[in-house]
Image: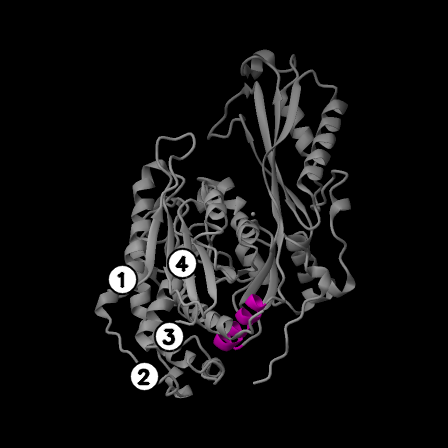
Amino acid sequence: MPRTPLTIPPHLLFPGRCLDCSLRGFLFANFSSLRSINTAAAARVLPSQIPTRRRTSHNNTSPATFSNPRQPYLTDAIRAHQARKMAPQLNGYFQQVDALADAFIERLRQAVAIPSISADPARRPDVVRMAKFLESELIKLGAQVELRELGRQPGSDVNLPPVVLARYGNDKNKRTILVYGHYDVQPAEKSDGWDTEPFELTVMPDGRMCGRGATDDKGPVLGWLNAIQAHQAAGIDFPVNLLMCFEGMEEYGSEGLDDLIYEEAKKFFADTDAVCISDNYWLGTERPCLTYGLRGCNYYNIEISGPGADLHSGVFGGTVEEPMTDLVRILSSLVDTNGKIQIPGIYEQVAPVTPEEEGLYDDISFNMETLYESLGSKTTIYDDKKKTLMARWRFPSLSIHGIEGAFSGAGAKTVIPAKVIGKFSIRTVPNMDIEKTNEAVSRYVEAVFKSLGSKNTMKVYPQHTGMWWVASPNHWNFTAAAKAIERVWGVKPDFTREGGSIPVTLTFEKATGKNVLLLPMGSSTDGAHSINEKLDKRNYIEGIKLLGAYLHYVAEEPME
């Protein structure tokens, strides 16, 4: 069937790091996810108990095959769309994904049961156990696997968890796709407010599969393994060579990963043709998306010192210049109540928005009500879609995160802190420069502190920085993924940016010199990092279909 080429205006094609995860540590998001309903877990079926059958014909599947009670969430139109004759070999693949759905859910159940919390050194054996689980599953599927050790964790007496490097296929006549994911998770306890045990996958009657790591990022990681298994069960030749890189420290700064990627760029990753990462989310709940841009993140500390020790406010209050007072006044000057950054030299760096680019936001499927659900309130700065999305993706933002050294416990403590450290970050966008931004922040904060006339001492410095990233969505990597979404979901994808930062994206692009695609499996309401994290069964099973379909369409794209 003739297809209309995907075109993105040239002004979006800027040349092109999750800091979010390393910043969070043991912190959790405070908004509430959808409330769970306690039910008995689905029957457990081990992958080895599911018979597989090899096929000799790949085109004997009719649209009626997809009238399957396993997918009550699929409309007749989508089932018919999946049965189209473009890449007809996909029909048998889709059928096997449906047939193996229980086995794939059981594989996810086994993975969620491993509390691979990278931020907690006491859980490091569990993180390693998760790596070995992936190694075992991949070996059973016939992949070549290596657990690459990264050495001692800096400032600790424990080793970093290994990176799982795997290859499936070595055909020089096929394209080679490198996929990345992570097998570590955020901390979780039932007492945090979970409706279910966080490390027991609970499948709800409405299809929500609740458990820590279900959507971030164990479900998507296992999606690639499941795609291999479904191809084998269908007797369909795997369309590409697949390189896999799964790390165990993403939620705590990805220590050691950059060095490994650059080290292997001309070795293990040498024949990479394109990169695919599934570690983000749809913009809403109904339409899949492809992500071609991420904001960067510059994280700053403002440190103010005064007395030689903490003081009693009843004894010394009113007689000393208090560091906390100075800090609060500086922090309050950084951004106004409408989210506008007050630091000169920030907006001047931002690439101008053209009328053509602004028009692209009109067609993006985004519902403010879904955003309100994710927020748990209607406290947005803007009430319309376009301004909200542009503020989230296209323009810089400044957020104040906390104060180190201040009293934050329960009850009351009448102390004057001797030293406090304020923490804030700026999300950067094209064409912002890291050093110019650092200089602008330093000049402004120093000027504000000087205007206070305080006798305390102050210093401001970047704690860490990460560059923004924008890829070319005209690349065949994106074209193939768009075709796969239309085949599986029956709709054209949204082309989106993300407001957050995923550092490894830029690292892979720089190290390999290849196009990087973000292809999400989960939706906006999954609650990654929050209580009651979930992955909808629909997104998991159809997401496995999507990953496989993407690889087939990649194989069909014209070679450069």
Q: Secondary structure at mark 3?
A: loop
Amino acid at dot 2: Thr
Number of residues whose C-alpha sits closer than 10 Å to that of mark 3, classed few (under 14), some (14–19) or many (20 or more) = few
| Nearest to the observer: residue 475 or residue 433 | 475
Foreground mark, 1 or 4, reads: 1
Q: Residue at x 33, y 40 (%)?
A: 124
Q: Is residue 288 visible?
A: yes
Q: Residue at x 58, y 24 (%)?
A: 420
Q: Secondary structure at mark 4?
A: helix
Q: Which residue has dot 4 on it?
A: 221
- Residues marked 4 and 3 touching at CB (< 8 Å): no
Compared to residue 487, the image places residue 451 above or below, namely above
Q: Say how the picture is coloured.
A: one colour
Q: Which residue has dot 1 on it?
A: 140
Q: Position of residue 305 (x, y in %)?
A: 61, 19
Foreground mark, 4 or 3, reads: 3
- Residues marked 1 and 2 touching at CB (< 8 Å): no
